[in-house]
Image: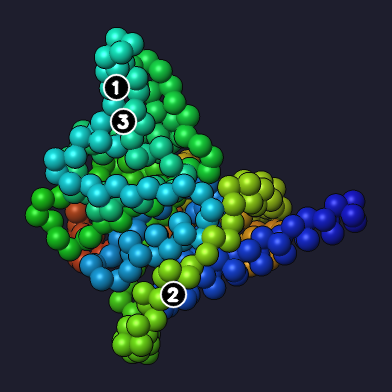
Amino acid sequence: MEFEQENTQTEIAQLRDAVVLVKEEIAKVIVGQGAMIDLMIAAILADGHVLIEGVPGVAKTLSAKLLARCLAVPFSRIQFTPDLMPSDVLGTSVFNPQQGTFTFKKGPIFSNIVLIDEINRSPAKTQAALFEVMEEKQITYDGVTYLMPPPFLVLATQNPIEQEGTYRLPEAQLDRFIFKIVVGYPTLDEELLILQYTHAGKTTHFAEEVKPVLTAADIQRFRGITAGLHVEEKVMRYIAELVFETRNNKALFLGGSPRASVAVLKSAKAIAAINGRNFVTPDDVIKVLPAVLRHRIILTPEKEMEGGTPDEVVAAIIKKVEVPR
């Protein structure tokens, strides 16, 4: 038993060191945004997709591309536009005149890391093409099922300000993202550093120097380690109580589903692993809760008119539910 604990701690230490290397590579180009990077890495360990929301110019797309460059796995980028068709994402049948048969040509979704830029730019038909692949890691075309190569991760971006020519994501699709990360503006000191980096020409130079740190095999191994972390019964109950409270909150029209509870559990394990621990604490749960819930809960019309936000409601729920000791 003692040997097993030592072995697990060694594996956790290896995971933590690998995460540090990934952060160091990204930090060559990105200034600040530590919380966003932590959550993106946690999503990889928790086997979940990420929705990144922020105004233009806050490095949403760049961060996603740099994270992909840190992983020695295939990467593809899809720019969503109003005229994009499902076949442009999933693939299509191509006629072979020599053989007189149709062959399925795979689309850009067939990759390990897929960046979908401005996901709310395409209409419902194209958005719906992502339902099966995001949930089941497969697509079905002409009755044939094609599996995605593991690991499979969708990183999607959207702009919350510009509404012209956009299509709101349905709740069923939002629920498939483990996190919705809201990216804010940098601090004054961080913005000064950005200007200094740009003036010195460092951003372009460093972008070319970002090297792969993790292989597909590493990611799968670290996911297994993360999934095996210890979670006490009282911490599991704490997660259940927090999500259950969203279904009985007067400020909410729609609360979190059981999928939200599972997402909190998996992502809290990932945060614990990133911090070098083989057990989950209530603080890990609190850290991931806003990112897990903010896109899954819907405010009542009254609360919206008051200017309330999902994050404010989540903060109130955290204060209300007793933290286990």
Q: CA distance from mark 2 to mark 1?
A: 41 Å
Tag 1 residue? 93
How many numbered dots are placed on residues in this image? Answer: 3
Q: Residues within 10 Å of mark 3 (few under 14, many from 20)?
A: some
- Relative to the observer, which residue lies in front, 36 or 196? 196
Q: CA distance from mark 3 to mark 2?
A: 34 Å
For the residue labelled by badge 2, is the local secondary structure a helix, a strand or a loop?
A: helix
- Relative to the observer, which residue lies in front, 300 or 25? 25
- Relative to the observer, which residue lies in front, 126 or 105? 105
Look at label 3 and name its amino acid: Gly
Q: Residues within 10 Å of mark 1 (few under 14, many from 20)?
A: some
For the residue labelled by badge 3, is the local secondary structure a helix, a strand or a loop?
A: strand
Tag 3 residue? 91
Q: Quadrant of the C terminus?
A: bottom right
Position of residue 219 relative to residue 322, above or below, is above
Task: Please state the horizontal and vertical placement of residue 98, each as a whole percent of the image.
Answer: 30, 13
Q: Name the residue at 24% across, 53% down.
A: 118
Task: Please state the horizontal and vertical placement of residue 134, each as a whole percent of the image.
Answer: 41, 38
Look at label 2 and name its amino acid: Phe
Which numbered disc, 2 or 1, marks the residue that appears first in the sequence?
1
Task: Please state the horizontal and vertical placement of residue 176, each as a whole percent of the image.
Answer: 39, 42
Q: Which mark is residue 206?
A: 2
Q: Name the residue at 59% across, 65% down.
A: 19
Which numbered disc, 3 or 2, marks the residue that appears first in the sequence?
3
Task: Please state the horizontal and vertical placement of residue 82, each as a whole percent of the image.
Answer: 14, 44
Q: Is residue 250 left or right of residue 259?
A: left
Q: Are marks 1 and 3 in contact (CB under 8 Å)?
A: no
